[in-house]
Image (cartoon, grey):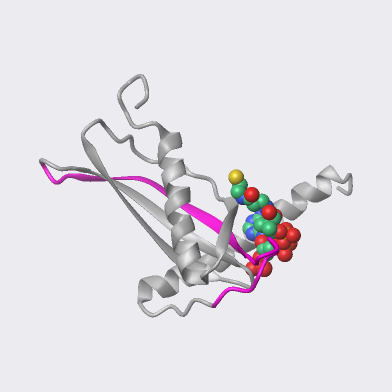
Amino acid sequence: MNAHRTVFGGLVMSTIDRLALVVAERHSGRVCVTVSVDAMHFLSPAAEGDTLIYSASVNRAWRTSMEIGARVIAENSYTGETRHIVSAYLTFVALDEHNRAIDVPPVQPESDIEAQRFREAEVRRRLRLDHAKTLHAMREGRT
Ligand SMILES: CC(C)(COP(=O)(O)OP(=O)(O)OC[C@H]1O[C@@H](n2cnc3c(N)ncnc32)[C@H](O)[C@@H]1OP(=O)(O)O)[C@@H](O)C(=O)NCCC(=O)NCCS
């Protein structure tokens, strides 16, 4: 807990990373590592006594990487009231026995919501890679 008795955000971030890793490893059947985490926005605090409910899904896979979406809800077990605490998108890369990136199976969206996550994941990937490329070029003194 924080000094003002709300849940410490770092604990939630760590749990999201662990759960998303399980999703990535189940999808790929490989050891995976986190390569990127998009901005995480804490929308509402979780209080002492709340039950935190985590959900995560693989939104899309490319050649060796996968985007996992995670969402955390706080539930008051006595009233049933729920609040959306945080959402995050994490990218994992599957590794072979020599710790090199290795191909992963594609994702086949089935429901409407899966198809929406699949489409949006491509937009986020483009932004992530552009961002990384721009910063790299700046550091190399090319911009
Ligand atoms: C993950 C890692 C093995 C990738 O190695 P690499 O030589 O950069 O491999 P590549 O350039 O082929 O990139 C592998 C994939 O990562 C993706 N990737 C690289 N940087 C990325 C970024 N900033 N955001 C999103 N995806 C990224 C690439 O697009 C590629 O995906 P694709 O094959 O699906 O197109 C290496 O960067 C690494 O070991 N990072 C540290 C991981 C780690 O320790 N995580 C825990 C942190 S505590």
The verdict on residue 119 being magenta is no
Residue most toward the front?
97
Q: How many marks overall? A: 0
Q: Tell me if residue 128 can be seen.
A: no
What residue is rendered at 15% in x and 43% in y?
A: 77
Which span of residues is magenta-colored?
Answer: 79-105
User: Relative to 119, is 38 above or below?
Assistant: above
Q: Is 93 a magenta residue?
A: yes
Task: Measuring from the top left, give residue 5's x and y in whole percent.
Answer: 30, 24
Q: Please tell me which residue is depicted at 39% across the width and 31% down the height of the picture.
A: 8
* Residue that lies at the very extreme toward the left in this rendered image: 78
**Residue furthest out toward the right:** 141
Residue 94 to residue 52: above or below: below
108 or 97, which is in the foreground?
97
Percent across and percent down for residue 80 are 14, 46
Residue 114 vs 74, above or below: the answer is below
Q: Measured along the vertical axis of the image, is residue 35 above or below residue 117?
A: above
Horizontally, residue 27 falls left or right of residue 140, namely left
The image shows residue 81 at horizontal and vertical percentages of: 17, 44
Q: In which quarter of the image is ligand 1?
A: bottom right
Question: Can residue 100 be seen from the camera position used here?
Answer: yes
Quarter assignment of residue 85: top left
